[in-house]
Image (spheres, helix red, strand yellow):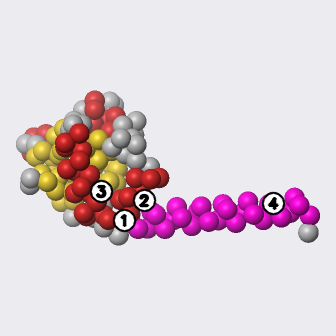
Amino acid sequence: MGTGVRKAQIALLVLAALAGVGLATYWAGEQTEVVVIRTLDGDGTTHDTKVWAVDHDGVPWVRVANPERSWFQRLSRNPRAVLIRGGVERPVIARPQDSGETRAIIDQRFREKYGVVDGWYGVLLRRDPIPVRLDPAPEAAKLP
């Protein structure tokens, strides 16, 4: 067997392994609670994004792994959103809380709830996560 064929086989094995890790990570992330955040863009279109959620002091929190994410950018422009949790839609006002103390508390809640998968996602995807408090909003604040 030639060197080129051997390199191609190794490359395919590496790609297959990476794909397997990706699928396993996705599957593991779906095994604990996943909620939906419905955000609104500038032209009035709603966008649903699946995220993890924890509760702290009786309020749900989510966390953005990278502040450049489109759902977080939409919340930055318009903090009105809908939290869909357990099939129930609740209007919320998103309030990013980027203090070190808040980050430590919310990160701990995520570790307690999501365990090893939270740590693995941190290695793969998370860069300076920002906790986002989801305060209840008046029913009138519900998105269209």
N-terminal-most mark, 4 or 1: 4
Does the segment drawn in magenta span residue 22? yes
Whole-angstrom CA distance, mark 3 to mark 2, is 14 Å
Residue at point 24% right, 55% down?
A: 108
Whole-angstrom CA distance, mark 4 to mark 1, is 34 Å
Residue type pointed to by label 2: Trp
Q: Quick check: marks 4 and 2 in contact, CB under 8 Å? A: no
Q: Which residues make up the magenta segment? A: 2-29
Q: Quick check: marks 1 and 2 in contact, CB under 8 Å? A: yes
Mark 2 residue crowding within 10 angstroms, few (<14) / some (14–19) / many (20+) = few
| Above or below: residue 53 compared with residue 102 | below
**Of the pair 48 and 22, the residue shown nearer to us:** 22
- Mark 2: which secondary structure? helix
Whole-angstrom CA distance, mark 3 to mark 1, is 14 Å
Q: Which residue is mark 3?
A: 52
Q: Which residue is mark 1?
A: 116
Asked which quadrant contains residue 31, the reply is bottom left
- Mark 4: which secondary structure? helix
Q: Which residue is mark 4?
A: 7
Mark 4 residue crowding within 10 angstroms, few (<14) / some (14–19) / many (20+) = few
Instruction: Give the numbered dot on residue 120.
Output: 2
Quadrant position of the N terminus in the picture:
bottom right
Residue type pointed to by label 4: Lys
Q: Quick check: marks 4 and 1 in contact, CB under 8 Å? A: no
Asked which quadrant contains residue 7, the reply is bottom right
Residue at point 49% right, 68% down?
A: 24
Whole-angstrom CA distance, mark 4 to mark 3, is 39 Å
